[in-house]
Image (spheres, rainbow, N blue to C red):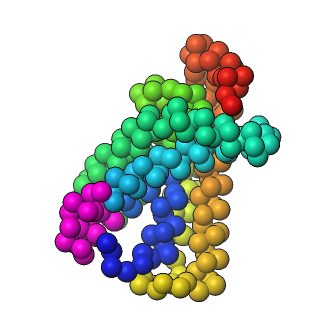
Amino acid sequence: MLRSPPTPSAMNEALSLPPVHSIFDLFLLSSASGLAGATAASLVAFAALILFHAAYMTAAISLAQSAHEHRTNREALAVAWGRLRSRFAWVLIVELGFVSLSIVVIRIAPIFGGFGLIVGLMGILYFAVFVEPAVVLQGMTALDALRASIGVARLIGTRNVYLVGGYVLLVIVVSLAPGRPGVVTPSVVVWTYALLAGLLHLSMLSAFVHRWGVLGPVVLPEPARQGEEAAPALQP
C-alpha cells in the first residue's frame, strides 16, 4: 500500500509505548491515503495496526510481569495467552482511547511550536502510562485503570517525570535512525539499530510494568487487591 518499504525509524516506532505508536499510526494512515489514493484500504490497514498493538501490549505486559515473578517460560506463555483471551477487548478500547488523545495532540501541538508534541507526549505518558498494565494485570475497566494510573503517577511525582522524560528523550534519539526509505535489504548497521531500539522499548515497558506491580496495589481499592491475590490460582 505504501509502494515502498517503511523507514527503519517507522518500523521501530511500531514497537514503542502508546501514545508514541498511536501518533505514528495516524501519520502512517495519512501518508498511505495520499500515496495509494485508497482511503478504504488505508483504514483497514489502520484497524489491523490497532488490533496488533492491543495484542502485542497484552502479551508483552504479561510476559514482563511473569519475568518479574520468575515464572517458567511455559507458565509465562500460558498466563499471557489467558490474559490475551480475557482482556483483549479492554486493551483494544484503551488503544482506541490513545488514538483519540493522539489526534487531539496532533491538532493542538502546532499552536505551541516545536515542543508542543513533546509536551503532549509527556503529559499523556505521565498520567496514562500505567493504564494498560492495570487493565492487563488487574483486569480493570479502562476508566478505573485511568484513575489508578493517575493515582500512581501522583504517588511517585517527580520520579515518574524523570522516567517519562527519559523515555520521550529515548524516542527522539532513536528516531534519528540510520538507513533510508525504500531499501528492501537493510545494512548491518540498520539491523543493529533496530534490535537495540526494540530492546530499549521493551526495557522501558518492563520498567513501567514493574513500577505498577510494586505501587499499583497501594492505590487499588480493597476488592481489586483481593481479586488480584486470588487470580494466580485461577490463571493457567
Q: Position of residue 208 (x, y in %)?
A: 61, 44
Question: If the image is split into quadrants, where does the C terminus sit?
Answer: top right
> In the figure, residue 30 lies in which quadrant?
bottom left
Give me the residue at 34% from left, 52% from top: 47
Name, please, the residue furthest toward the top: 223
The number of discs equals 0
Give me the residue at 39% from left, 61% from top: 24
Q: Is residue 54 something one can see in this rendering?
A: yes
Give me the residue at 76% from left, 46% from top: 73
In front of the other: 203 or 42? 42
Left-right relation of 85 to 196: left
The magenta segment? 27-44
In front of the other: 66 or 78? 78
- Vertical comparison of 16 with 31: above or below: above
Q: Position of residue 97 (x, y in %)?
A: 36, 41
Q: Is residue 125 something one can see in this rendering?
A: no
Please tell me whether residue 37 belongs to the stretch shown in magenta: yes
Q: Position of residue 61 (x, y in %)?
A: 60, 43
Please tell me whether residue 112 belongs to the stretch shown in magenta: no
In front of the other: 28 or 3? 3
Question: If the image is split into quadrants, where does the N terminus sit?
Answer: bottom left
- Vertical comparison of 34 with 140: above or below: below
Give me the residue at 60% from left, 67% from top: 197
Magenta stretch, overall SS: helix
Left-right relation of 114 to 223: left
Q: Position of residue 29 (x, y in %)?
A: 29, 63
- Vertical comparison of 129 with 34: above or below: above
- Vertical comparison of 34 with 154: above or below: below
